[in-house]
């Protein structure tokens, strides 16, 4: 989300998680998602691929943490 700081970027994800949790209670299966967030830094992200690689790494860290907690 362009023009959004890290704190505000989490709010839509919290809303999505709550809505998905409520919807999953009515389904015979669970729907889930994974997301990686990163703040653009022109010093670190010279190319779009640099930004995407960091977001991808963030997503996999989050997935690993979620798996370890369950």
Image (cartoon, rainbow, N blue to C red):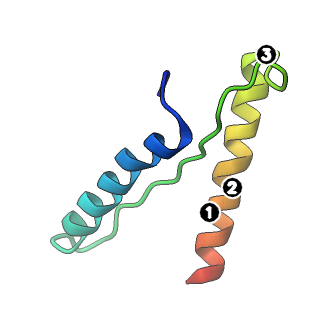
- Does 23 sit left or right of 52 as displayed? left
Name the residue that disc number 1 marks. Answer: 63
Label ID, residue 39: none
Question: What residue is disc 3 on?
Answer: 47
Instruction: Tell me which numbered mark, 2 or 3, is placed earlier along the sequence.
Output: 3
Q: Nearer the viewer, mark 3 or mark 1?
A: 3
Q: Which residue is mark 2?
A: 60
In this rendering, is residue 23 above or below 4?
below
**Which quarter of the rendered picture does the C terminus lie within?**
bottom right
Q: Is residue 7 left or right of residue 18?
A: right
Q: Callout 2: 10 Å neighbours few (<14), some, many (20+)?
A: some
Which residue is found at the position 37% from the left and 56% from the top?
Answer: 14
Q: Residue at x 65, y 70 (%)?
A: 65
Marks 2,1: beta carbons within 8 A: yes
Disc 1 residue crowd, few under 14, some 14–19, many 20+, Cα 10 Å:
some
Q: Position of residue 58 (x, y in %)?
A: 69, 49
Q: CA distance from mark 2 to mark 1?
A: 5 Å
Q: Nearer the viewer, residue 30 or 5?
A: 5
């Amino acid at each position: 989300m362009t023009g959004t700081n890290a704190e505000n970027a989490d709010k839509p994800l919290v809303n999505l998680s709550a809505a998905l949790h409520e919807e999953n209670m009515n389904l015979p299966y669970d729907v889930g998602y994974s997301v990686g967030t990163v703040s653009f830094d022109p010093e670190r992200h010279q190319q779009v691929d640099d930004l995407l690689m960091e977001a991808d790494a963030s997503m996999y860290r989050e997935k690993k943490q979620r798996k370890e907690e369950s």
